[in-house]
Image (cartoon, helix red, strand yellow):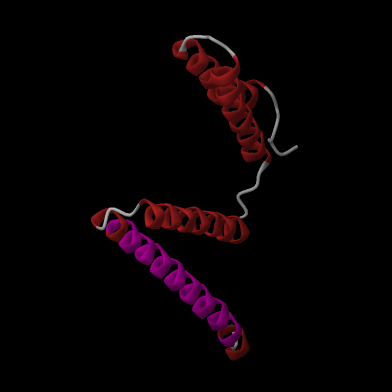
Amino acid sequence: MCAADVGSNDGGLLESRASNAALGLGYLLVGIGLAYSLAVNSIGLFAAVLVGVIGLVVLSLAILVRREGLITAENKLIGAFVLLAMALLFGLHELTALPSEIIFGVVFAVGVVVPHLLLDYTDYGTPK
């Protein structure tokens, strides 16, 4: 390892630490904002802070995916079935008169059981 390698690697490390610190500060400020909005009983401020929470979570997920490469075939399959299950939950609840137990059973089967069975009993996502 030469000195040029160490220098170039430190820039990425410092940049990573700075972005982590900024993200941590963002979460701290959002937490303070939530506590303050509850203390002053302001639903408008509470809603604004919740939008900030969603923004920070999306930013955190984007950073995680970029750094770790979490987009795999298995994760795509599971994500697709979870989105389908969420659509079924809202659709069945709003458009049918089915009891909630049946709706949650269908949602559980589509969101959890089906992707698990597909991953266990097929070669989907395994390296060839």
**Residue 110 in the image: above or below residue 55:** above
Q: Quadrant of the N terminus?
A: bottom right
Q: Is residue 26 above or below residue 57?
A: below
Give residue 73's quadrant in the image. top right
Residue at the left extreme, as displayed: 39
* Residue toward you, 13 or 79: 79
Q: Could you say where residue 126 lies in the image, as x and y percent from the top left?
A: 68, 35
User: In percent of the image, x 24 and y 56: which residue is there?
Assistant: 39
The magenta-colored residue range is 7-35
- Describe residue 114's horizontal placement relative to residue 22 as left or right: right
Q: Is residue 100 above or below residue 49?
A: above
| Res 64 → quadrant | bottom right
Q: Residue at x 70, y 28 (%)?
A: 123
Q: Residue furthest right?
A: 128
Decide whether residue 111 is among the magenta residues: no
The image position of residue 122, as x and y in percent, is: 69, 23
Q: Residue 3, image x and y in percent?
A: 58, 90
Task: Kindly identify the residue that appears in the image at 57 percent across and 87 percent down.
Answer: 7
Q: Indicate whether residue 20 is drawn in magenta.
A: yes
Q: Nearer the viewer, residue 102 or 73?
A: 102
Give residue 109's position: percent from left, percent from top.
55, 18
Q: Quadrant of the C terminus?
A: top right
Q: Main secondary structure of the magenta part?
A: helix
For this view, does 67 lie left or right of residue 28?
right
Q: Is residue 97 above or below residue 89?
A: above
User: In the visual, does 48 lie left or right of 67?
Assistant: left
